[in-house]
Image: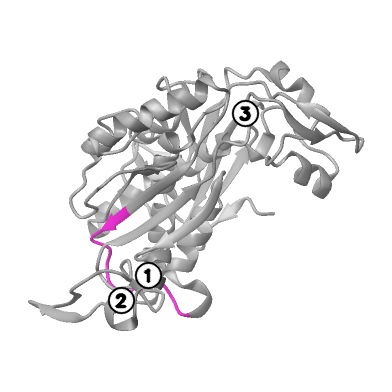
Amino acid sequence: MGNTFGHLFRITTYGESHGGGVGVIIDGCPPRIEISEAEIQVDLDRRKPGQSKITTPRKEEDKCEILAGVFEGKTLGTPISILVRNKDARSQDYSEMSEKFRPSHADATYQAKYGIRNWQGGGRSSARETIGRVAAGSIAKKILHQVAGVEIIAYVKRIQNLEAIIDSDTVTLAQVESNIVRCPDSEMAEKMISAIELVRRDGNSIGGIIECVARNVPVGLGAPVFDKLEADLAKAIMSLPATKGFEIGSGFEGTRLTGREHNDEFYRDGDRTRTITNRSGGIQGGISNGENIIIRAAFKPTATIMQEQKTVDIHGEETTLIARGRHDPCVLPRAVPMVEAMVALVLCDHLLRQKAIS
């Protein structure tokens, strides 16, 4: 349970961090969509480890293999299976964690729930599980762009106390990809990189905020009450490893305003009804209104650090642990394509649901 996401466009991810591989089964993808391993690989390369000096040094090519659902470069309308094989696992690095729980990690809770856990790299709780999401998200983004012209761009907004100034209406993918921290504010990006390098040398970690904008989203996506678009986006984002917060539009800052200040007044733009401001973040009443959807995700500092901490072992004895292995000192640069993927999966699912009722 808990490994499947979506309704009409549905994905199921599988695999463990140090197993034979990880991947995804995609069901509900429309037929005749042109897709290739090379296209999917673009987003997987943005997510993969070892890509820069501020990410984990684990060396994985993360090359994807489409095993089913695509014929002569086009989707068949049948389930799509995508696999990425693990090739650089070092399970011996985790031998001590077989007995000791890493603070703020999933070790203790998985053990309590199942009475067994894969302690090699964290198993299913590892961020390698997100490979399947990013692969599926690549296909979802293509469907959204082809059908409705939707564009989804995520970027690092803040690292610890270093916050960038970014125009979500005009930011481009090229600007995001212009540096290794994936912050389109080049001056702030250099400061962020320095902060991550410093904390890495200290065997510690830091977190921050990723912002994501979806442009050209059709009016009418979402449903009342329990299937509100922002509710599904919140679930999608909060299902990512290390997430601790979700905001849309004005978010928590909107609580500082009065209703008069916060309301998005309407006006007519040709044959469209639009809003003068966008504090709603592109969604009102759980349904998209045609303005840009803007969300933010808070990521905690990486739980696994190379400093001694107090913990408890599987026998209930108090002890200490200095974690080993290869880990990101800050997850945000590699989490950017993960956020894009989850937003794309939600929007694609709701787009197909809207077409079904129309």
Residue 305's label in the rendered image is 3
Left or right of 197 on screen, residue 88:
right
| Disc 1: which residue | 254
Residue at (44, 76) in percent of width and height: 223
| Three-letter code, disc 3 | Ile
User: In the visual, does 84 lie left or right of 259?
Assistant: right
Number of numbered discs present?
3
What SS does tag 2 mark?
helix
Rounded to the nearest whole Å, what is the CA distance between mark 3 and mark 2? Answer: 41 Å
Q: Main secondary structure of the magenta part?
A: loop
Q: Which residue position is annotated with label 2?
A: 262
Q: CA distance from mark 1 to mark 3?
A: 35 Å
Q: Is residue 231 above or below residue 207?
A: below
Q: Earlier in the sequence, mark 1 or mark 3?
A: 1
Q: Are marks 2 and 1 in contact (CB under 8 Å)?
A: yes
Q: Which of the marked residues, 3 or 2, is nearer the chain's N terminus?
A: 2
Q: Give the residue drawn at x 43%, y 33%.
A: 47
Q: Is residue 206 magenta?
A: no
Give coordinates of residue 189: x percent, y percent: 30, 33
Q: Secondary structure at mark 1?
A: helix
